[in-house]
Structure formats: structure tokens, C-alpha cells
């Protein structure tokens, strides 16, 4: 359990209030949160929850699977005959055809192995980006959870407002004022969170655009011709 998971567990209620108030009350037309909402396409609580549930573990595990498969494929390729069939006492057209196809299969397997290692490196790079994104999100979540805006969101009282209310001898229309104060606090918290997520999403999109998609392959088949059975390599 990392910092983001722990913080999200304790701040889920606060984030729920932020999303609810933004959905019900919105924010002033010129508030910084509006362009951030348009670019990210989600409410801050939803984004934090989504990232908290997104683990780099499967990417790292798949990268290791690809590396193991690449090593296994290299071993199979190395086991294919590299000498001329005559060196094994095998002569004739079938022997020559087998040698040609074995050489082609060896080259294809080595090519696949190189691709698998490259895909593993890409998955590892994505996993490291996700680890960094989770850490950065945890930091900003920790800041807003301990901020004055968080206190205002929970209490409905802006800093200094309680003293002013006592001095005035009461607070007519307090419920409406409290809602407006809480909505303003929610907008500030939301803007702070979304600003960081906006940067994270931009970095993630740039990384995905730069890194080609990993191809899903479960088996490589190399036909060595009628002189031998097809060779299957589980990946």
C-alpha cells in the first residue's frame, strides 16, 4: 500500500464532497477550474480514485513475462542446427530445405526476441511513469487535505468568518452563505488537484505517443517444412 492508496482511503469523503459541490454549485465563470475540467474531462475525485486503483504491477509483471519468453526463444533458436546437413550425415533435397528453413526460423525467432525485449522496456517505462504519477498525486492530495480550504469545506465557515458572525450577533441566511463558502472551497481544492492531473495526463499522453503499442502475442509458429513438424514456441 503506497502513499496514494493510504491518502485516498482517508480523503475519499472529502473528495466526494468536492465532486458533489462542483456538480451542484459549479464555480465562478472565470475560475481556473473550468479549463482544467475541460482538458481532463473528469471531476477531481474521480481522477484521484481512478489513479489510486491503477497499479503499475501488471505492467511490470508482463514485462518480466516478455523477458522470460525472449530468453526461452533465444535458447530454442540457439538449439536449431547451424551447420550444413551433411555435417550430420543427412544429405539430399529434404536436408537442404530443412537447413534453409531452420536458418529462416532462427532469424525470425531472434527478431521476435528483440521485439519482445523492446516491448518489455516500453512496459517498464510506462510502469515507472505511473509510479511517479502516483507519488506526485499523493503529494498534492496531502497538501489539499491539510489546507484551510479543506477545513472550510467540512465546516462551511471561511477563516475568520466565525469571529465576524459572533461580533455581528448572528448570521441570517447562514445556510445559503455556508453553501457558497463550501462551494468556493471545493472549487479551489478541485483546481489544485486538476492542475497536477492535467500535467500528469499530458506527460502520459506524450509517453504513449512516443512509445509504440505493445503487440499481444502468445505463440510463435515456425514451419520447418515437410521434413519436420512445425515448431511452436510459447511466449
Image (tube, rainbow, N blue to C red):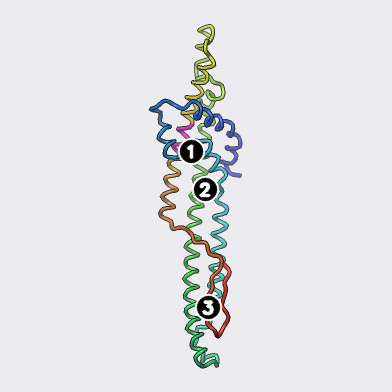
x and y, in percent, of residue 214 in the image: 48, 59
Give the alpha-carbon distance from disc 1 to disc 3, as whole Å: 50 Å
Q: Which mark is residue 223?
A: 3
At mark 3, the secondary structure is loop
Residue 117 drawn above or below residue 17: below
Which residue lies under the disc numbered 1? 42
Tell me what residue is drawn at x 47 percent, y 66 percent. 115
At a point 56% along the width and 75% down the height, the residue shown is: 76
Please state, as top left, top right, bottom left or bottom right, where the C terminus lies in the image. Answer: bottom right
Depth order, front residue of 205/132: 205
Per the rendered image, the range of residues in magenta is: 190-196
The residue positioned 52% from the left and 21% from the top of the image is: 179
Who comes first in sequence, dot 3 or dot 2? Answer: 2
- Where does the image place residue 33, in percent across and percent down from the top left? 43, 32
Is residue 121 shown left or right of residue 58? left
Q: Mostly what secondary structure, the magenta segment?
A: helix
Vertical position of residue 142 compared to residue 157: above or below: below
Amino acid at each position: 500500500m503506497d502513499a496514494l492508496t493510504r491518502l485516498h482511503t482517508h480523503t475519499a469523503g472529502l473528495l466526494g464532497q468536492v465532486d458533489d459541490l462542483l456538480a451542484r454549485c459549479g464555480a465562478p465563470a472565470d475560475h481556473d477550474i473550468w479549463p482544467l475540467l475541460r482538458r481532463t474531462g473528469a471531476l477531481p475525485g474521480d481522477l484521484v480514485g481512478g489513479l489510486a486503483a491503477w497499479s503499475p504491477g501488471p505492467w511490470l509483471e508482463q514485462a518480466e513475462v516478455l523477458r522470460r519468453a525472449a530468453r526461452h526463444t533465444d535458447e530454442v533458436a540457439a538449439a536449431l542446427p547451424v551447420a550444413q546437413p551433411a555435417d550430420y550425415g543427412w544429405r539430399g533435397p529434404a536436408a537442404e530445405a530443412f537447413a534453409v528453413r531452420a536458418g529462416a526460423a532462427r532469424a525470425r525467432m531472434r527478431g521476435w526476441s528483440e521485439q519482445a525485449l523492446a516491448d518489455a522496456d516500453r512496459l517498464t517505462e510506462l510502469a515507472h511513469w505511473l509510479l511517479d504519477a502516483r507519488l506526485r498525486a499523493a503529494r498534492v492530495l496531502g497538501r489539499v487535505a491539510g489546507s484551510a480550504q479543506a477545513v472550510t469545506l467540512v465546516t462551511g465557515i471561511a477563516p475568520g468568518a466565525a469571529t465576524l458572525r459572533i461580533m455581528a450577533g448572528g448570521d441570517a441566511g447562514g445556510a445559503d452563505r455556508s453553501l457558497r463558502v463550501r462551494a468556493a472551497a471545493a472549487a479551489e481544492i478541485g483546481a489544485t488537484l486538476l492542475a497536477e492531473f492535467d500535467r500528469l495526463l499530458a506527460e502520459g499522453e506524450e509517453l504513449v505517443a512516443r512509445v509504440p503499442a505493445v503487440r499481444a502475442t502468445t505463440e510463435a509458429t515456425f514451419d520447418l517444412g515437410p521434413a519436420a513438424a512445425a515448431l511452436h514456441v510459447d511466449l
